[in-house]
Amino acid sequence: MPEAAFDRSNARYLQGSSNQGWTPLHAHLHRTLKERQLLVQKQRVLVAVSGGQDSLCLVKLLLDLEPKWGWHLAIAHCNHRWRSDSDANAAYVNQLACNWQIPYYQQTAESVTTSEATARQWRYEALTTIAQQHDYSCIATGHTASDRAETLLYNLMRGSGADGLQALVWKRLLTPAIQLVRPLLGMTRAATGQFCHDAQLQVWDDTTNDDLTYARNRIRQELLPSLHHFNPQVEFALSQTAELLQADVEYLEAQAAALLQQAQHPERLGLDRAVLQNAPLALQRRTARQFLQQALPCAPNFDHIEKLVGLITAPNRSQTDPFPGGAIAHVEANWIWLKHYNDSCG
Ligand SMILES: Nc1ncnc2c1ncn2[C@@H]1O[C@H](COP(=O)(O)OP(=O)(O)OP(=O)(O)O)[C@@H](O)[C@H]1O
């Protein structure tokens, strides 16, 4: 980086508005951000940094691109308090933010959660709260193509349909005013690791990543490496599958919503069988799911949906077993009615 200068903290290269010193990864990210319209010039961006290689790579790349985009970057860290080194981990991320002279915000969990899903939910809520309090319109996370591939494999093995396989989108709204973006979805974990190594960024080693009792870690450490024997680019291939499915799912969901609108009784919980009978099975299933989603107290599973779809062509007076909450669907001539609904999730 011959023309680069150091900023006051001597820790961050200032590159003016030129691209000097950019690696291919910088150029790749710059292009991705523009092409996918993930960020805009001068935006206030809160970067979610765990201290691991992906989020460190993300924040460093964004810092290097900042002069060109004019963003206002800040770091947010969520301390889950679930490891003995959690406080030290948070202090390390705080120190990095100080070195780079950007704002640092932290939320610390009041109680230690054991489930990954609960921890994740708390984390997104904590990040959203920070963004709201400090007026950031965007939260960026360091998810990569490798995370996307792992999520796809994990959901595939749990029997998820296309909806679960679309795994991790590039951007989505967390609130009407705050967008979540994942700028690194086009890069693998190998690339972020190499970048951190080359940039001499010290990565905080999360020891829970080595725990093979977690399915996600097993997929990462055992399954994906074996799949590399079949296709060295398997992460990109799976990630691309997720991308294709995303567009398919979006289209099918919109079609199903339109069909539900036509088939649904205007006042009662009922579906017009004549409208549904001519539709393809894919849409019948999605329409049935959307109908059950609004009628049941819990998310419908595959069996619930299949039972309802079965009634589309079943003889008059056929009925299902009770759904969660106690409701039963039954056929009365052209209509499927859902009755005996109560609020408990059995
Ligand atoms: N403790 C944390 N504090 C701030 N950001 C975090 C923290 N943990 C994870 N993140 C953000 O989330 C990204 C993904 O992390 P990780 O893969 O560990 O989480 P995950 O639980 O699989 O996430 P998701 O549910 O969103 O897939 C990180 O790159 C980082 O941006």
Image (spheres, rainbow, N blue to C red):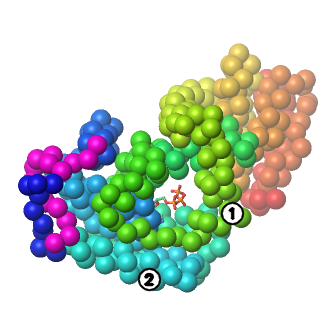
Residue 224 magenta-drawn? no
Q: Nearer the viewer, residue 293 or 45?
A: 45
Seen in the picture, residue 177 relative to 272 is either above or below; the reply is: below
Asked whether, in this view, residue 309 is left or right of residue 30, the answer is right
Residue 14 visible in the picture: yes
- Which secondary structure is most common in the magenta stretch? loop
* Camera-side residue of 201 and 277: 201
Q: Which residue is mark 2?
A: 88
Q: Under tag 1, what secondary structure?
A: loop
Name the residue that disc number 1 marks. Answer: 212
Which stretch did the figure color magenta? 10-24
Q: Which mark is residue 332?
A: none
Mark 1 residue type: Leu
Residue 142, percent from left and from top: 42, 56
Q: Name the foreground residue: 29 vs 230.
A: 230
Quarter holding the N terminus is bottom left
Does the magenta portion include 15?
yes
> In the image, what residue type sits under mark 2?
Ala
